[in-house]
Image: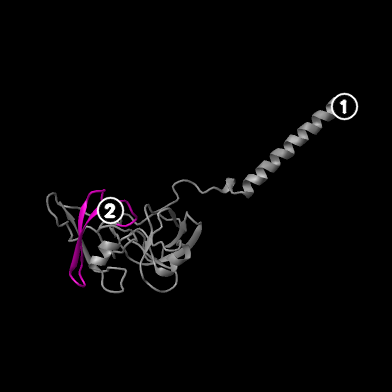
Amino acid sequence: MKVQRKHVLAATVAVAASVVVSVGTGMGFAQTAPAGRAVCAGSVTFSAEGGPPAATSDRFPVGTRLRVTNLDNDKVATVTVTGTAGSCVLLNAAAMDLIREPGKNVIRRNVVERLDGLAPVPGEDRPVETRPGNAQPVGGSACTGAITFSAEDGPPAATSGQFPVGTRLRVTNLDNDLAVTVTVTGPSGSCVLLNAAAMAAIREPGKNLVRRNVVQLLR
């Protein structure tokens, strides 16, 4: 009888262990995404571009497929890069609508994954070289690509993935020669992401994107 009880106990433990493994796998524990999977850092925002879900990027070549997940609501958009921008990833309107929360124009908590598994194109995300003491960076502009904005309130300001908090920048819209001077107040996924007041100072009516621009680093 004692032997039988030991066998019963052993069998019970084995079944319990099997159930734990099965439940863990079913809940995703065994399929947890590895660390370091995200290819962009900072907030994700969007342009007013129409068409099916797509994105532009200053880091990935045209044709690259990216998956963008909003961690606040777990919604996902899979997009193809169609051109250049001033951000690691800048969604178009349709892609943003798939994952945004109502009334929000920026996704702060996100994961961007490159679906083809390749690394970013070398050299495309390097900071622009500047001359000490000179407000005009080498190459004419401290950022490349289109500039967009977040829904942040307050006086004209910007966030940046390239410049530290406190940096002063002058942003000029070359289509209307309007300029705004802003101070970087925090990080984002763009070289420069204007807030609502800064964008209002230089935008053309009905446009949420400034394609032709110059960004100067002020000393």
Residue 178 within the segment the image draws in magenta: yes
Q: Residue furthest front?
A: 154
Q: Residue at x 14, y 49 (%)?
A: 132
Residue that label 2 marks: 126
Q: Secondary structure at mark 1?
A: loop
- On the image, the x and y values in percent for residue 116 come to 46, 59
Q: Earlier in the sequence, mark 1 or mark 2?
A: 1
Q: Quadrant of residue 58?
A: bottom left
- The disc at residue 1 is 1
Q: Quadrant of residue 95?
A: bottom left
Crowding near the residue tagged with mark 1, few <14, some 14–19, many ≥20 C-alpha atoms within 10 Å = few
Front residue of 112/95: it is 95
Residue 127 in view: no
Q: Secondary structure at mark 2?
A: loop
Front residue of 98/56: it is 98
Q: CA distance from mark 1 to mark 2?
A: 74 Å
Horizontal placement of 44 versus 15: left or right? left
Question: Which image quadrant: the N terminus?
Answer: top right
Residue 5 in view: yes
- The disc at residue 85 is none
Horizontal placement of 32 versus 48: left or right? right
Q: How many marks?
A: 2
Residue 201 within the segment the image draws in magenta: no
* Amino acid type at image mark 1: Met
* Amino acid type at image mark 2: Arg
Find the magenta span and give its range: 161-190
Crowding near the residue tagged with mark 2, few <14, some 14–19, many ≥20 C-alpha atoms within 10 Å = few
Horizontal placement of 123 versus 111: left or right? left
Please determine whether, in this image, residue 79 is positioned above or below residue 108: below
- On the image, the x and y values in percent for residue 44 come to 38, 58
Q: Residue furthest right?
A: 1
